[in-house]
Amino acid sequence: MEWSNPEGRRIRLVEGDITRVPVDAIANAANSALAGGGGVDGAIHRAGGPAIMRELDVIRARQGGCPTGRAVATTAGNLPAKWVFHAVGPVYRDGRHNEPALLASAYRGCLDLAREHGARTLSFPSISTGVYGYPIEEAARIAIATVREHLAAETTLEEVVFVLFGRAAYDTFAQALG
């Protein structure tokens, strides 16, 4: 499924493996320790190789991690991309602890890094909807709205691709994309 705005910038949905979709930058659903993990984070580290963790080691030594709602950039190692933007989404508690704003901020952090690095294409997973427990219907609405807002402003991005794991996630994002 695809959506485009009057400027010709696109949002595209793909069901599949984010590590196999060629883009300028891949957003990673990272943890605040930037220490690697399971799910999307683990898949990105396995496919990208040790170069990604070496750069994260330097970032951790400099700043100690990454706060929730923020993102940092590294090389993409062996991935079909130039950069990985490691975004830290919120752990969902009940929706009343600033989770929506923090989730939107994690997406914006990656979008801002895309602008800073001159990326034309960027892929996202569904941030915070795995082990962090964010309800995917709400998360999809926040993700799509945040990306649409960014694409309406001055940006280097021409296409944002949501790479979703499984048909249910794809269908939920398709409904949010409308």
Image: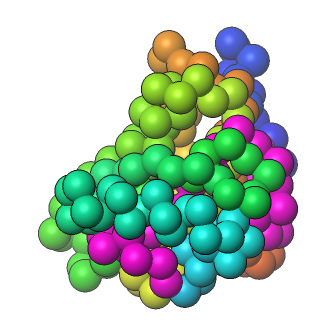
Is 29 placed left or right of 79 in the picture?
left
Is residue 14 part of the magenta span, yes or no? Answer: yes
The x, y position of residue 77, in whole percent, is: 68, 57
Residue at x 68% of width, y 78% of height:
46
Residue at x 80% of width, y 52% of height:
80
Is residue 103 part of the magenta span, yes or no? Answer: no
The x, y position of residue 101, in whole percent, is: 27, 52
Residue at x 82% of width, y 69% of height:
16
The answer to whether residue 169 of the structure is visible from this angle is: no
**Total label count?**
0
Is 25 placed left or right of 117 in the picture?
right
**Residue 93, quarter of picture:** bottom left
The magenta segment: 12-37
Nearer the observer, 70 or 90: 70
The x, y position of residue 123, in whole percent, is: 67, 49
Residue at x 21% of width, y 56% of height:
63
Nearer the observer, 51 or 76: 51
Is 153 placed left or right of 50 in the picture?
left
Is residue 9 depicted above or below 61 in this figure? above
The answer to whether residue 112 of the structure is visible from this angle is: yes
The x, y position of residue 140, in whole percent, is: 54, 59
